[in-house]
Amino acid sequence: MQLLLEELRNYDPDIIAFQELEPYVLNFINSNGVDSYECRYKSRQRPEGCGLLFKKIKFNCLAELNIDFNDITDYPQFERKTINFLTHNVGQLLLLESKQTNKKFWVSNSHLFWNPSYYYVKLMQVYHLLNQILSKIEVEPEIYPIIILGDFNSYPGSEVFEYLSTGSLQKVPEVLDLHKKFKFQHPFKLQSAYSALDHPVTNITPDFTKPIDFIWYSKNDFELHSLLDSVDI
């Protein structure tokens, strides 16, 4: 916990995205002098969830949407409902406005299903995430750029990564049993912030060492200036 405080004070970020965040962590942060953030929190059935923090002095929050990935179960695109999508994963979406420039942008935070064998569940989760984002964008008077943060439990070369980075998917997994006319497509022109560094590792376990956490942004609207160095393993 002390290391977390040191990181926050050292880097002083404007926006922070937490996954697997327990409420006591927020209380600890605020009680130790890091109280310049406003937090929007979406809990899971477990005592943890996703948290989006932004600096109160820099941004106003104009809109908010909490995303429940269990809702995928009710999608009409399935020929038959043979897959259990009740993973209790969650996501968030905020529309923020800069107090200095009045410019608006969307920021999203999510935590996808962990199991590597169920790549198709994660694929439907990211499809649902982008659909929910699109539904909010379409009701606004203008199209605002977007930043998508999170633990995607997916890595470069996976279906989730292909879909996010290219806007489409060459081959739809048959196991999903979707209608034949269904297509994985999205209109966002997204860039992974760490693509220039060949995506440094963000997860280390005895049998799995890969990057699974990403920062995506509208590449036609944002300009990347710098990155944190990768962590020595």
Image (tube, rainbow, N blue to C red):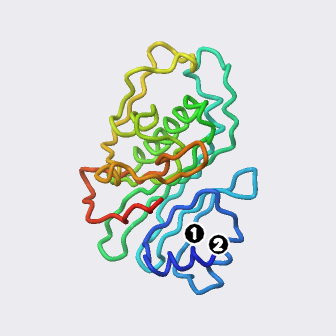
Of the pair 208 and 177, the residue shown nearer to us: 208
**SS at mark 1?**
strand
Residue 143 appears in the rendering: no
Residue 174 appears in the rendering: yes
The residue carrying mark 1 is: 39
**Spatial CA span between label 1 and label 2:** 8 Å
Cβ atoms at labels 1 and 2 below 8 Å apart: yes
- Number of other residues with Cα within 10 Å of mark 2, as a class: few under 14, some 14 to 19, many 20 or more: some
Q: Amino acid at mark 1?
A: Cys
The residue carrying mark 2 is: 26
On-image quarter of the N terminus: bottom right
Expressed as whole percent of the image width and height from the top left, the position of residue 176 reads: 57, 21
**SS at mark 2?**
helix
Q: Amino acid at mark 2?
A: Leu
Residue 26, by quadrant, is: bottom right
Residue 60, relative to residue 233: is it above or below? below
- Number of other residues with Cα within 10 Å of mark 1, as a class: few under 14, some 14 to 19, many 20 or more: some
Expressed as whole percent of the image width and height from the top left, the position of residue 218 reads: 31, 50
Residue at image point 52% right, 81% down:
36
Which residue appears farthest toward the right when viewing the image?
A: 46
First reached walking from the N terminus: tag 1 or tag 2: 2
104 left or right, relative to 77:
left
Expressed as whole percent of the image width and height from the top left, the position of residue 151 reads: 53, 50
Expressed as whole percent of the image width and height from the top left, the position of residue 131 reads: 47, 38
Closer to the observer: label 1 or label 2?
A: 2
Residue at image point 55% right, 73% down:
38
Of the pair 231 and 52, the residue shown nearer to us: 231
Residue at image point 46% right, 54% down:
149
